Image (spheres, helix red, strand yellow):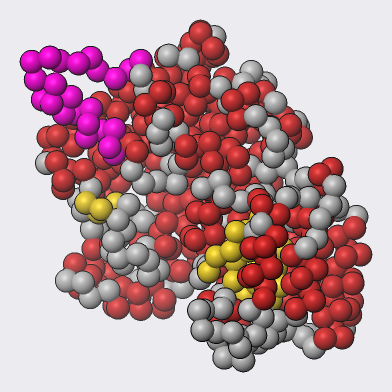
Amino acid sequence: MALDETIREVPESADRARIRSLADELAAGNASGPAPGKDELRHTARGALEQLGLPTVYLGFAMVAVSNAFWRDRFAAVPFHRRLLFMPRCLLPGPNDHGRPLNDIAEKARDAGYRVMVAEGTPEVVMKMLERDADAVMGVACLHSLEKAFAHIDRMGVPRVAVPLLRDGCADTEVEHDQVMALLTAQRDAASVSPTYLPLWRLARGLFEEPDFSRLLKDVRGPEIARNPTAFRAVETVALDWLKTGGKRLRPFIVLAAYAAAEHGAAALLPEADPEAVAPDSVRGLALAIEALHKASLIHDDIEDGDAFRYGRPTVHCQQGLASAINAGDWLVGLGYRLVAGTTDFAGADAIADILQNLASAHIALCRGQGAELLWSESPWSLTTADALAGYALKTAPAFEAALFAGLRAGGATLDRPLLKRFALCVGEAYQVANDLDDWHATDAGKKIFGRDVMTRRPTLLHALALQKSDPDILRRAQAQARECRLDDMRNLYDNADVFGQAERLLAKLKARAQAVADQAPDPDMRDLLRFLARMILG
Protein backbone atom coordinates (compact mmCIF):
# COMPACT_ATOMS: atom_id res chain seq x y z
CA MET A 1 0.00 0.00 0.00
CA ALA A 2 1.75 3.11 -1.20
CA LEU A 3 1.71 6.37 0.71
CA ASP A 4 -0.55 8.84 -1.06
CA GLU A 5 0.30 12.49 -1.49
CA THR A 6 -2.05 13.58 1.33
CA ILE A 7 0.07 11.97 4.07
CA ARG A 8 3.55 13.01 2.93
CA GLU A 9 3.85 16.44 4.56
CA VAL A 10 6.79 17.07 6.89
CA PRO A 11 5.89 18.97 10.09
CA GLU A 12 7.65 21.97 11.55
CA SER A 13 10.63 21.58 13.87
CA ALA A 14 8.76 21.46 17.20
CA ASP A 15 6.27 18.87 15.97
CA ARG A 16 9.04 16.79 14.44
CA ALA A 17 10.68 16.62 17.86
CA ARG A 18 7.39 15.67 19.55
CA ILE A 19 6.73 12.89 17.04
CA ARG A 20 10.24 11.47 17.41
CA SER A 21 10.10 11.58 21.21
CA LEU A 22 6.80 9.69 21.32
CA ALA A 23 8.05 7.23 18.68
CA ASP A 24 11.01 6.41 20.95
CA GLU A 25 8.63 5.73 23.85
CA LEU A 26 6.37 3.51 21.73
CA ALA A 27 9.29 1.52 20.31
CA ALA A 28 10.97 0.98 23.68
CA GLY A 29 8.66 -1.88 24.60
CA ASN A 30 9.47 -3.71 21.36
CA ALA A 31 13.21 -3.15 21.24
CA SER A 32 14.03 -6.86 21.12
CA GLY A 33 10.90 -8.02 19.31
CA PRO A 34 10.22 -8.71 15.64
CA ALA A 35 10.53 -5.85 13.18
CA PRO A 36 7.28 -3.97 12.62
CA GLY A 37 5.69 -4.42 9.20
CA LYS A 38 4.28 -1.57 7.18
CA ASP A 39 0.74 -2.05 8.48
CA GLU A 40 2.01 -2.04 12.06
CA LEU A 41 4.08 1.08 11.40
CA ARG A 42 1.04 2.80 9.92
CA HIS A 43 -1.15 1.81 12.89
CA THR A 44 1.42 2.92 15.49
CA ALA A 45 2.18 6.17 13.68
CA ARG A 46 -1.50 7.00 13.31
CA GLY A 47 -2.01 6.41 17.04
CA ALA A 48 0.96 8.66 17.83
CA LEU A 49 -0.45 11.51 15.74
CA GLU A 50 -3.84 11.16 17.44
CA GLN A 51 -2.19 11.20 20.86
CA LEU A 52 -0.28 14.37 19.94
CA GLY A 53 -3.29 16.00 18.31
CA LEU A 54 -1.53 16.27 14.94
CA PRO A 55 -3.13 15.81 11.51
CA THR A 56 -2.76 12.68 9.37
CA VAL A 57 -0.90 14.65 6.70
CA TYR A 58 2.18 13.85 8.81
CA LEU A 59 1.57 10.09 8.75
CA GLY A 60 4.46 9.32 6.38
CA PHE A 61 6.91 11.24 8.56
CA ALA A 62 5.56 9.59 11.71
CA MET A 63 6.00 6.13 10.15
CA VAL A 64 9.66 6.93 9.47
CA ALA A 65 10.07 8.11 13.06
CA VAL A 66 8.58 4.90 14.48
CA SER A 67 10.71 2.77 12.15
CA ASN A 68 13.87 4.69 13.11
CA ALA A 69 13.09 4.24 16.80
CA PHE A 70 12.92 0.47 16.35
CA TRP A 71 15.95 0.10 14.05
CA ARG A 72 18.34 2.77 15.38
CA ASP A 73 20.31 0.59 17.81
CA ARG A 74 20.44 -2.33 15.39
CA PHE A 75 21.64 -0.04 12.63
CA ALA A 76 24.27 1.45 14.93
CA ALA A 77 25.63 -2.03 15.74
CA VAL A 78 26.67 -2.55 12.09
CA PRO A 79 30.24 -1.38 11.36
CA PHE A 80 30.57 1.73 9.19
CA HIS A 81 32.23 -0.17 6.35
CA ARG A 82 29.17 -2.45 6.13
CA ARG A 83 26.67 0.41 5.84
CA LEU A 84 25.16 1.95 2.71
CA LEU A 85 24.03 5.58 2.43
CA PHE A 86 21.69 6.40 -0.42
CA MET A 87 20.75 9.93 -1.40
CA PRO A 88 18.93 11.56 -4.31
CA ARG A 89 21.06 13.12 -7.02
CA CYS A 90 20.18 16.61 -5.87
CA LEU A 91 21.99 16.04 -2.56
CA LEU A 92 25.20 14.62 -4.02
CA PRO A 93 27.85 17.14 -5.03
CA GLY A 94 29.09 17.22 -8.61
CA PRO A 95 32.62 18.23 -9.58
CA ASN A 96 31.70 21.92 -9.69
CA ASP A 97 28.98 21.97 -7.05
CA HIS A 98 30.93 23.32 -4.10
CA GLY A 99 28.06 25.58 -3.13
CA ARG A 100 25.39 22.90 -3.14
CA PRO A 101 23.84 22.51 0.35
CA LEU A 102 24.72 19.48 2.43
CA ASN A 103 27.54 18.42 0.13
CA ASP A 104 29.54 17.37 3.19
CA ILE A 105 27.20 14.47 4.04
CA ALA A 106 28.46 12.15 1.30
CA GLU A 107 32.07 13.12 1.98
CA LYS A 108 31.82 12.43 5.71
CA ALA A 109 30.03 9.16 5.06
CA ARG A 110 32.78 7.99 2.71
CA ASP A 111 35.46 9.08 5.18
CA ALA A 112 33.78 6.93 7.83
CA GLY A 113 33.74 3.93 5.50
CA TYR A 114 30.19 4.02 4.15
CA ARG A 115 29.32 3.06 0.61
CA VAL A 116 27.46 6.01 -0.91
CA MET A 117 25.16 5.78 -3.90
CA VAL A 118 22.53 7.67 -5.82
CA ALA A 119 19.33 5.63 -5.60
CA GLU A 120 16.19 6.61 -7.43
CA GLY A 121 14.21 3.64 -6.17
CA THR A 122 14.13 0.06 -4.93
CA PRO A 123 16.19 -1.93 -7.48
CA GLU A 124 19.47 -0.10 -6.97
CA VAL A 125 19.39 -0.38 -3.18
CA VAL A 126 18.27 -4.02 -3.17
CA MET A 127 20.97 -5.00 -5.65
CA LYS A 128 23.66 -3.37 -3.52
CA MET A 129 22.47 -5.35 -0.52
CA LEU A 130 22.39 -8.62 -2.44
CA GLU A 131 25.84 -7.99 -3.91
CA ARG A 132 27.29 -8.34 -0.41
CA ASP A 133 28.26 -4.67 -0.27
CA ALA A 134 26.36 -3.70 2.90
CA ASP A 135 24.40 -5.05 5.85
CA ALA A 136 22.52 -1.88 6.84
CA VAL A 137 21.01 1.07 4.96
CA MET A 138 20.55 4.76 5.67
CA GLY A 139 18.41 6.87 3.36
CA VAL A 140 18.28 10.65 3.01
CA ALA A 141 15.55 11.50 0.51
CA CYS A 142 11.95 12.64 0.10
CA LEU A 143 9.28 10.43 1.67
CA HIS A 144 8.24 9.05 -1.72
CA SER A 145 11.79 7.97 -2.60
CA LEU A 146 12.35 6.48 0.85
CA GLU A 147 9.20 4.40 0.51
CA LYS A 148 10.26 3.08 -2.90
CA ALA A 149 13.81 2.29 -1.86
CA PHE A 150 12.82 0.54 1.37
CA ALA A 151 9.93 -1.45 -0.12
CA HIS A 152 11.90 -4.71 -0.39
CA ILE A 153 14.57 -3.91 2.19
CA ASP A 154 11.77 -3.98 4.76
CA ARG A 155 11.06 -7.61 3.88
CA MET A 156 14.66 -8.78 4.30
CA GLY A 157 15.05 -7.79 7.93
CA VAL A 158 17.83 -5.34 7.10
CA PRO A 159 18.57 -2.61 9.69
CA ARG A 160 17.67 0.74 8.16
CA VAL A 161 17.12 4.35 9.18
CA ALA A 162 16.04 7.40 7.23
CA VAL A 163 15.89 11.17 7.34
CA PRO A 164 13.17 12.69 5.13
CA LEU A 165 13.90 15.87 3.21
CA LEU A 166 12.10 18.90 4.59
CA ARG A 167 11.26 20.03 1.09
CA ASP A 168 10.84 17.81 -1.98
CA GLY A 169 12.37 18.60 -5.33
CA CYS A 170 15.90 19.31 -6.44
CA ALA A 171 15.70 23.08 -6.03
CA ASP A 172 16.36 24.56 -2.58
CA THR A 173 16.42 21.10 -1.01
CA GLU A 174 16.58 21.09 2.79
CA VAL A 175 17.29 18.36 5.30
CA GLU A 176 17.86 18.19 9.06
CA HIS A 177 21.62 18.13 9.10
CA ASP A 178 21.87 17.31 12.83
CA GLN A 179 19.57 14.31 12.44
CA VAL A 180 21.58 13.03 9.46
CA MET A 181 24.89 13.30 11.28
CA ALA A 182 23.53 11.74 14.49
CA LEU A 183 22.40 8.64 12.63
CA LEU A 184 25.41 8.62 10.31
CA THR A 185 27.90 8.48 13.19
CA ALA A 186 25.88 6.31 15.60
CA GLN A 187 27.72 3.28 16.98
CA ARG A 188 26.66 0.66 19.49
CA ASP A 189 27.86 -2.63 20.90
CA ALA A 190 27.41 -5.64 18.63
CA ALA A 191 24.98 -7.09 21.18
CA SER A 192 22.33 -5.04 19.39
CA VAL A 193 22.72 -6.91 16.10
CA SER A 194 19.49 -7.84 14.38
CA PRO A 195 18.59 -11.25 12.95
CA THR A 196 18.35 -10.98 9.18
CA TYR A 197 17.55 -13.20 6.20
CA LEU A 198 19.91 -11.19 4.01
CA PRO A 199 22.79 -13.75 4.14
CA LEU A 200 20.40 -16.49 3.01
CA TRP A 201 19.15 -14.27 0.18
CA ARG A 202 22.74 -13.79 -0.92
CA LEU A 203 23.37 -17.51 -0.62
CA ALA A 204 20.35 -18.29 -2.83
CA ARG A 205 21.55 -15.90 -5.52
CA GLY A 206 25.09 -17.25 -5.30
CA LEU A 207 23.91 -20.73 -6.23
CA PHE A 208 23.60 -19.53 -9.82
CA GLU A 209 26.95 -17.80 -9.96
CA GLU A 210 30.43 -19.22 -10.35
CA PRO A 211 32.12 -21.06 -8.76
CA ASP A 212 29.15 -22.44 -6.78
CA PHE A 213 27.05 -23.21 -9.86
CA SER A 214 29.62 -25.49 -11.51
CA ARG A 215 30.64 -27.10 -8.21
CA LEU A 216 27.08 -28.07 -7.32
CA LEU A 217 26.50 -29.53 -10.78
CA LYS A 218 29.79 -31.37 -11.19
CA ASP A 219 28.24 -34.80 -10.53
CA VAL A 220 25.18 -34.41 -12.73
CA ARG A 221 26.47 -32.82 -15.93
CA GLY A 222 26.86 -35.04 -18.96
CA PRO A 223 30.15 -36.74 -19.87
CA GLU A 224 32.45 -35.35 -22.51
CA ILE A 225 31.67 -36.83 -25.95
CA ALA A 226 35.02 -36.79 -27.74
CA ARG A 227 33.70 -37.10 -31.29
CA ASN A 228 31.16 -34.24 -31.13
CA PRO A 229 30.92 -32.59 -27.68
CA THR A 230 29.04 -29.56 -29.00
CA ALA A 231 26.18 -31.62 -30.40
CA PHE A 232 25.79 -33.96 -27.44
CA ARG A 233 25.89 -31.12 -24.94
CA ALA A 234 23.61 -28.80 -26.89
CA VAL A 235 20.57 -29.34 -24.68
CA GLU A 236 22.65 -28.99 -21.52
CA THR A 237 24.10 -25.70 -22.74
CA VAL A 238 20.66 -24.24 -23.47
CA ALA A 239 19.12 -25.52 -20.23
CA LEU A 240 21.90 -24.36 -17.92
CA ASP A 241 22.03 -20.94 -19.55
CA TRP A 242 18.32 -20.61 -18.86
CA LEU A 243 18.72 -21.88 -15.30
CA LYS A 244 21.35 -19.22 -14.57
CA THR A 245 19.35 -16.41 -16.20
CA GLY A 246 16.90 -14.12 -14.43
CA GLY A 247 14.36 -14.83 -11.74
CA LYS A 248 13.93 -13.73 -8.15
CA ARG A 249 15.42 -16.99 -6.80
CA LEU A 250 12.44 -17.08 -4.46
CA ARG A 251 12.01 -20.85 -4.31
CA PRO A 252 15.65 -21.72 -3.60
CA PHE A 253 15.64 -19.05 -0.91
CA ILE A 254 12.58 -20.69 0.67
CA VAL A 255 14.41 -24.04 0.72
CA LEU A 256 17.48 -22.53 2.38
CA ALA A 257 15.48 -20.49 4.88
CA ALA A 258 13.24 -23.44 5.81
CA TYR A 259 16.24 -25.72 6.33
CA ALA A 260 18.00 -23.05 8.40
CA ALA A 261 14.93 -22.57 10.60
CA ALA A 262 14.54 -26.33 11.11
CA GLU A 263 18.19 -27.16 11.74
CA HIS A 264 19.56 -24.03 13.42
CA GLY A 265 16.63 -21.87 14.52
CA ALA A 266 17.17 -18.16 15.11
CA ALA A 267 20.97 -18.63 15.27
CA ALA A 268 21.00 -19.03 11.47
CA LEU A 269 19.83 -15.43 11.10
CA LEU A 270 22.65 -13.75 12.99
CA PRO A 271 25.03 -11.78 10.71
CA GLU A 272 28.04 -13.75 11.94
CA ALA A 273 26.47 -17.13 11.12
CA ASP A 274 28.70 -19.25 8.88
CA PRO A 275 26.92 -19.92 5.55
CA GLU A 276 28.81 -23.20 5.12
CA ALA A 277 27.42 -24.43 8.42
CA VAL A 278 23.94 -22.97 7.93
CA ALA A 279 23.47 -24.53 4.48
CA PRO A 280 25.97 -27.18 3.38
CA ASP A 281 26.33 -28.15 -0.27
CA SER A 282 23.71 -30.89 -0.08
CA VAL A 283 21.08 -28.36 1.00
CA ARG A 284 22.22 -25.96 -1.71
CA GLY A 285 21.86 -28.76 -4.24
CA LEU A 286 18.31 -29.28 -3.03
CA ALA A 287 17.59 -25.57 -3.45
CA LEU A 288 19.10 -25.68 -6.95
CA ALA A 289 16.85 -28.65 -7.76
CA ILE A 290 13.68 -26.74 -6.84
CA GLU A 291 14.71 -23.87 -9.11
CA ALA A 292 15.55 -26.26 -11.96
CA LEU A 293 12.03 -27.72 -11.79
CA HIS A 294 10.54 -24.23 -11.64
CA LYS A 295 12.55 -22.97 -14.62
CA ALA A 296 11.56 -26.09 -16.59
CA SER A 297 7.90 -25.25 -15.99
CA LEU A 298 8.49 -21.70 -17.21
CA ILE A 299 9.92 -22.92 -20.54
CA HIS A 300 6.86 -25.06 -21.12
CA ASP A 301 4.51 -22.36 -19.80
CA ASP A 302 5.95 -19.77 -22.20
CA ILE A 303 5.43 -22.16 -25.11
CA GLU A 304 1.83 -22.90 -24.15
CA ASP A 305 0.98 -19.25 -23.52
CA GLY A 306 2.80 -17.97 -26.61
CA ASP A 307 4.98 -15.59 -24.59
CA ALA A 308 7.85 -14.02 -26.51
CA PHE A 309 9.79 -12.39 -23.65
CA ARG A 310 10.80 -13.19 -20.10
CA TYR A 311 13.47 -11.56 -17.92
CA GLY A 312 13.89 -8.87 -20.56
CA ARG A 313 15.02 -11.25 -23.29
CA PRO A 314 13.39 -13.63 -25.82
CA THR A 315 11.98 -16.80 -24.32
CA VAL A 316 13.80 -20.08 -24.90
CA HIS A 317 11.49 -21.29 -27.68
CA CYS A 318 11.85 -17.95 -29.48
CA GLN A 319 15.64 -18.23 -29.30
CA GLN A 320 16.15 -21.94 -29.88
CA GLY A 321 13.00 -23.14 -31.59
CA LEU A 322 10.05 -25.08 -30.23
CA ALA A 323 11.57 -28.57 -30.25
CA SER A 324 14.83 -27.53 -28.61
CA ALA A 325 12.96 -25.57 -25.94
CA ILE A 326 10.77 -28.55 -25.04
CA ASN A 327 13.88 -30.72 -24.84
CA ALA A 328 15.66 -28.20 -22.60
CA GLY A 329 12.66 -28.08 -20.28
CA ASP A 330 12.57 -31.86 -20.08
CA TRP A 331 16.31 -31.89 -19.33
CA LEU A 332 15.78 -29.49 -16.42
CA VAL A 333 13.04 -31.74 -15.02
CA GLY A 334 15.50 -34.61 -15.04
CA LEU A 335 18.19 -32.43 -13.50
CA GLY A 336 15.87 -31.38 -10.69
CA TYR A 337 14.96 -34.90 -9.67
CA ARG A 338 18.58 -36.03 -10.05
CA LEU A 339 19.75 -33.29 -7.69
CA VAL A 340 17.11 -34.20 -5.10
CA ALA A 341 18.08 -37.86 -5.22
CA GLY A 342 21.73 -36.84 -4.85
CA THR A 343 21.09 -35.55 -1.32
CA THR A 344 20.05 -38.96 0.02
CA ASP A 345 23.25 -39.55 1.98
CA PHE A 346 22.84 -36.19 3.69
CA ALA A 347 19.10 -36.09 4.46
CA GLY A 348 18.34 -39.82 4.61
CA ALA A 349 16.37 -42.06 2.29
CA ASP A 350 13.04 -41.56 4.10
CA ALA A 351 13.32 -37.76 3.92
CA ILE A 352 14.25 -37.79 0.23
CA ALA A 353 11.39 -40.20 -0.56
CA ASP A 354 8.98 -37.76 1.14
CA ILE A 355 10.46 -34.78 -0.71
CA LEU A 356 10.26 -36.55 -4.09
CA GLN A 357 6.68 -37.60 -3.46
CA ASN A 358 5.75 -34.03 -2.53
CA LEU A 359 7.49 -32.63 -5.61
CA ALA A 360 5.75 -35.14 -7.86
CA SER A 361 2.37 -34.17 -6.41
CA ALA A 362 3.17 -30.47 -7.00
CA HIS A 363 4.24 -31.30 -10.57
CA ILE A 364 0.92 -33.08 -11.26
CA ALA A 365 -1.07 -30.25 -9.69
CA LEU A 366 0.75 -27.69 -11.85
CA CYS A 367 -0.12 -29.62 -15.01
CA ARG A 368 -3.75 -29.90 -13.95
CA GLY A 369 -3.96 -26.17 -13.33
CA GLN A 370 -2.24 -25.36 -16.61
CA GLY A 371 -4.54 -27.78 -18.45
CA ALA A 372 -7.61 -26.05 -17.07
CA GLU A 373 -6.17 -22.66 -17.98
CA LEU A 374 -5.51 -23.75 -21.55
CA LEU A 375 -9.07 -25.05 -21.85
CA TRP A 376 -10.58 -21.86 -20.48
CA SER A 377 -8.42 -19.73 -22.75
CA GLU A 378 -10.35 -21.25 -25.66
CA SER A 379 -13.71 -20.50 -24.08
CA PRO A 380 -13.28 -18.06 -21.20
CA TRP A 381 -16.91 -17.01 -20.95
CA SER A 382 -17.80 -19.76 -18.48
CA LEU A 383 -14.99 -18.83 -16.06
CA THR A 384 -16.06 -18.16 -12.46
CA THR A 385 -14.05 -16.61 -9.64
CA ALA A 386 -14.02 -20.01 -7.93
CA ASP A 387 -12.58 -21.54 -11.11
CA ALA A 388 -9.87 -18.89 -11.33
CA LEU A 389 -8.82 -19.29 -7.69
CA ALA A 390 -8.86 -23.09 -7.97
CA GLY A 391 -6.54 -22.82 -10.97
CA TYR A 392 -4.21 -20.54 -9.01
CA ALA A 393 -4.27 -22.99 -6.11
CA LEU A 394 -3.08 -25.76 -8.46
CA LYS A 395 -0.52 -23.76 -10.44
CA THR A 396 1.22 -21.81 -7.68
CA ALA A 397 0.40 -22.98 -4.15
CA PRO A 398 1.90 -26.51 -4.45
CA ALA A 399 5.18 -25.09 -5.76
CA PHE A 400 5.57 -22.85 -2.70
CA GLU A 401 4.60 -25.73 -0.42
CA ALA A 402 7.09 -28.07 -2.12
CA ALA A 403 9.98 -25.63 -1.58
CA LEU A 404 9.01 -25.09 2.04
CA PHE A 405 8.48 -28.81 2.64
CA ALA A 406 11.84 -29.74 1.07
CA GLY A 407 13.84 -27.44 3.34
CA LEU A 408 11.95 -28.36 6.49
CA ARG A 409 12.04 -32.11 5.83
CA ALA A 410 15.76 -32.04 5.05
CA GLY A 411 16.28 -30.16 8.32
CA GLY A 412 14.41 -32.76 10.33
CA ALA A 413 11.53 -30.51 11.34
CA THR A 414 8.31 -31.88 12.79
CA LEU A 415 5.86 -30.98 10.04
CA ASP A 416 2.28 -29.79 10.36
CA ARG A 417 1.24 -30.68 6.82
CA PRO A 418 -2.29 -29.17 6.99
CA LEU A 419 -0.84 -25.87 8.23
CA LEU A 420 1.77 -25.80 5.45
CA LYS A 421 -0.93 -26.47 2.86
CA ARG A 422 -3.17 -23.70 4.20
CA PHE A 423 -0.28 -21.27 4.27
CA ALA A 424 0.85 -22.15 0.73
CA LEU A 425 -2.73 -21.89 -0.53
CA CYS A 426 -3.15 -18.35 0.79
CA VAL A 427 0.27 -17.28 -0.48
CA GLY A 428 -0.18 -18.95 -3.88
CA GLU A 429 -3.59 -17.45 -4.55
CA ALA A 430 -2.49 -14.01 -3.38
CA TYR A 431 0.65 -14.20 -5.52
CA GLN A 432 -1.42 -14.89 -8.65
CA VAL A 433 -3.99 -12.18 -7.89
CA ALA A 434 -1.12 -9.73 -7.48
CA ASN A 435 0.23 -10.86 -10.88
CA ASP A 436 -3.17 -10.25 -12.46
CA LEU A 437 -3.21 -6.71 -11.13
CA ASP A 438 0.42 -6.16 -12.11
CA ASP A 439 -0.46 -7.00 -15.71
CA TRP A 440 -2.28 -3.66 -15.86
CA HIS A 441 0.57 -1.66 -14.35
CA ALA A 442 3.25 -0.11 -16.53
CA THR A 443 6.50 -2.08 -16.16
CA ASP A 444 9.72 -2.64 -18.05
CA ALA A 445 8.65 -3.05 -21.68
CA GLY A 446 11.34 -5.68 -22.17
CA LYS A 447 9.79 -7.84 -19.47
CA LYS A 448 6.21 -7.98 -20.62
CA ILE A 449 3.50 -6.28 -22.60
CA PHE A 450 0.96 -4.13 -20.81
CA GLY A 451 -2.42 -5.91 -20.68
CA ARG A 452 -1.03 -9.10 -22.22
CA ASP A 453 -3.37 -11.38 -20.27
CA VAL A 454 -6.32 -9.89 -22.14
CA MET A 455 -4.68 -10.07 -25.55
CA THR A 456 -3.75 -13.73 -25.11
CA ARG A 457 -7.18 -14.62 -23.67
CA ARG A 458 -5.57 -15.90 -20.48
CA PRO A 459 -8.29 -16.70 -17.93
CA THR A 460 -7.69 -14.50 -14.89
CA LEU A 461 -9.52 -13.61 -11.72
CA LEU A 462 -10.05 -10.12 -13.15
CA HIS A 463 -11.83 -11.62 -16.15
CA ALA A 464 -13.99 -13.80 -13.90
CA LEU A 465 -14.94 -10.80 -11.76
CA ALA A 466 -15.89 -8.86 -14.88
CA LEU A 467 -18.07 -11.73 -16.10
CA GLN A 468 -20.04 -11.58 -12.84
CA LYS A 469 -21.14 -8.01 -13.42
CA SER A 470 -20.96 -7.33 -17.15
CA ASP A 471 -22.79 -8.22 -20.32
CA PRO A 472 -20.81 -11.02 -22.06
CA ASP A 473 -21.44 -9.38 -25.43
CA ILE A 474 -19.68 -6.25 -24.22
CA LEU A 475 -16.80 -8.35 -22.98
CA ARG A 476 -16.46 -10.13 -26.30
CA ARG A 477 -16.30 -6.84 -28.18
CA ALA A 478 -13.80 -5.43 -25.70
CA GLN A 479 -11.62 -8.50 -25.97
CA ALA A 480 -11.69 -8.37 -29.76
CA GLN A 481 -10.48 -4.79 -29.53
CA ALA A 482 -7.84 -5.88 -27.01
CA ARG A 483 -6.35 -8.28 -29.56
CA GLU A 484 -5.92 -5.21 -31.74
CA CYS A 485 -4.00 -3.60 -28.86
CA ARG A 486 -6.93 -1.37 -27.96
CA LEU A 487 -6.98 -1.98 -24.23
CA ASP A 488 -8.76 1.18 -23.08
CA ASP A 489 -12.19 -0.42 -23.54
CA MET A 490 -11.30 -3.38 -21.37
CA ARG A 491 -9.76 -1.17 -18.71
CA ASN A 492 -12.88 1.01 -18.68
CA LEU A 493 -15.06 -2.07 -18.39
CA TYR A 494 -12.98 -3.36 -15.51
CA ASP A 495 -13.15 0.04 -13.85
CA ASN A 496 -16.92 0.28 -14.26
CA ALA A 497 -17.39 -3.21 -12.79
CA ASP A 498 -15.02 -2.38 -9.88
CA VAL A 499 -12.88 -5.33 -10.94
CA PHE A 500 -9.60 -3.81 -9.78
CA GLY A 501 -11.11 -2.77 -6.46
CA GLN A 502 -12.56 -6.23 -5.83
CA ALA A 503 -9.24 -7.86 -6.67
CA GLU A 504 -7.33 -5.50 -4.37
CA ARG A 505 -9.73 -6.27 -1.51
CA LEU A 506 -9.40 -10.00 -2.10
CA LEU A 507 -5.62 -9.67 -2.19
CA ALA A 508 -5.67 -7.88 1.18
CA LYS A 509 -7.81 -10.68 2.66
CA LEU A 510 -5.50 -13.39 1.32
CA LYS A 511 -2.46 -11.60 2.75
CA ALA A 512 -4.19 -11.35 6.14
CA ARG A 513 -5.10 -15.04 6.00
CA ALA A 514 -1.51 -15.99 5.22
CA GLN A 515 -0.29 -14.04 8.26
CA ALA A 516 -3.03 -15.56 10.42
CA VAL A 517 -2.01 -19.09 9.38
CA ALA A 518 1.63 -18.23 10.09
CA ASP A 519 0.64 -17.11 13.58
CA GLN A 520 -0.80 -20.59 14.25
CA ALA A 521 2.58 -22.32 13.90
CA PRO A 522 3.45 -23.63 17.38
CA ASP A 523 7.23 -23.41 16.98
CA PRO A 524 8.48 -19.79 17.31
CA ASP A 525 11.21 -20.17 14.67
CA MET A 526 8.70 -21.65 12.23
CA ARG A 527 6.23 -18.91 13.05
CA ASP A 528 8.81 -16.21 12.35
CA LEU A 529 9.80 -17.92 9.08
CA LEU A 530 6.23 -18.13 7.79
CA ARG A 531 5.50 -14.53 8.80
CA PHE A 532 8.61 -13.40 6.97
CA LEU A 533 7.79 -15.42 3.85
CA ALA A 534 4.27 -13.99 3.73
CA ARG A 535 5.61 -10.43 3.96
CA MET A 536 8.45 -11.06 1.54
CA ILE A 537 6.46 -12.86 -1.16
CA LEU A 538 3.33 -10.74 -0.99
CA GLY A 539 4.56 -7.36 0.23
In the image, 308: left or right of 501?
Answer: left
In the displayed structure, 518 sits above or below 255; it is below
In the image, 225: left or right of 509?
Answer: left
In the image, 291: left or right of 490?
Answer: right
Picture coordinates of residue 184 (x, y %)? 74, 65
Q: Nearer the viewer, residue 155 or 473?
A: 155
Q: Which residue occupies 68% across, 32% down?
A: 273
Q: How many marks?
A: 0
Taking the image as drawn, is residue 225 in sight?
Answer: yes
Taking the image as drawn, is residue 32 in sight?
Answer: no
Q: Which residue occupies 53% across, 68% down?
A: 119
Instruction: Tell me, yes or no, whether the highlighted magenta stretch contains residue 232.
Output: yes
Q: Nearer the viewer, residue 405 or 376?
A: 405
Q: Nearer the viewer, residue 477 or 261?
A: 261
In the displayed structure, 212 sits above or below 346; it is below
Rendered image quadrant of residue 340: top left
Picture coordinates of residue 329 (x, y %)? 25, 32
Q: Which residue occupies 27% across, 74% down?
A: 487
Q: Nearer the viewer, residue 511 or 66?
A: 66
Picture coordinates of residue 446 (x, y %)? 28, 61
Instruction: Tell me, yes or no, whether the highlighted magenta stretch contains residue 539.
Output: no
In the image, 19: left or right of 107?
Answer: right
Task: Identify the residue at the far bottom of this view.
Answer: 172
Q: Which residue occupies 68% across, 44% down?
A: 196
Q: Quadrant of the C terminus?
A: bottom right
Q: Which residues are magenta?
A: 219-242
